[in-house]
Amino acid sequence: MYYFDSHEFCPRCSLKLEHRKEFIVCPSCGHHIFDNPKPCVNVILGNNKGEILLVVRKINPFKGWLDLPGGFIQSGETLEAAAIREAKEEINVDLKVGGMVGNCTAEYKYDGLVYKLLVFVVSGKADVSKIRVGDDASSFKFIPKGKVLKAKICFPEVNKTLIKKYLNS
């Protein structure tokens, strides 16, 4: 079930909501709930050997799989600030955000619900000798650019598409 579809009652007046294609509306008070995606940011960080950093996820979904460092953008946070925060939390580096690699939509299955996402990927630079795993990662690896698309990477429709875009830029 999509998270959007899990809303049954109006948060303002508690009456049953009507589900429409692009929004949910309360027939009593007129309150609307829109099907907006949750924004996320991932970071592509390389080293001087031409390799790309991937972390090993410590939590589900995809526990034990490779992933780009990143996560959800918090309320009131800019894309750049979120990338910097996530790099600090996951790999303990002070990230200098480079450029925008790209973005795409995705679905995130968690705790029995499916969330719609808008995923941004940025490139960045950091002192990779200081990498230490943090909150959501159990370890990290640098994968050669020529092998990264063959790796067991979670959310492959998103991560591999945007890594490929980075490699071709």
Image: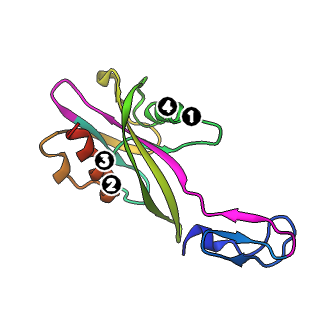
State which quarter of the image contains the C terminus.
Answer: top left
Q: Earlier in the sequence, mark 2 or mark 1?
A: 2
Label number found at residue 148: none
> Which quadrant of the figure has residue 94?
top left
Q: Secondary structure at mark 4?
A: helix
Residue 78 numbered mark, or none? 1
Q: Which mark is residue 64?
A: 2
Locate residue 67, reporting x and y percent: 33, 48
Would you call the spot at circle 3 few (<14 residues within 10 Å), some (14-19), or many (20 or more)?
Answer: many
Q: Which residue is mark 4?
A: 80
Q: Is residue 75 left or right of residue 168?
A: right
Question: Is there any visible trace of residue 37 in the rendered image?
Answer: yes
Pinpoint residue 136: horizontal percent, then vertical percent. Answer: 44, 45
Label 4: how many residues lie within 10 Å, few (<14), some (14-19) or many (20+)? some
Foreground residue among 73 and 151: 73
Residue hosting label 3: 162
Task: Evaluate if marks 4 and 1 touch, with contact meaning CB atoms under 8 Å apart.
Answer: yes
Q: Residue at x 74, y 71 (%)?
A: 25
Specify the segment rendered in magenta: 28-51
- Mark 1 is surrounded, within 10 Å at the Cα level, by few (under 14), some (14 to 19) or many (20 or more) other residues, namely few
Q: Amino acid at mark 4?
A: Glu
Q: Is 67 a magenta residue?
A: no
Hey, what amino acid is under mark 3? Leu
Q: Are marks 2 and 4 in contact (CB under 8 Å)?
A: no
Query: Residue 61 falls in which quadrant of the image?
Result: bottom left
| 159 vs 111, nearest the viewer | 159
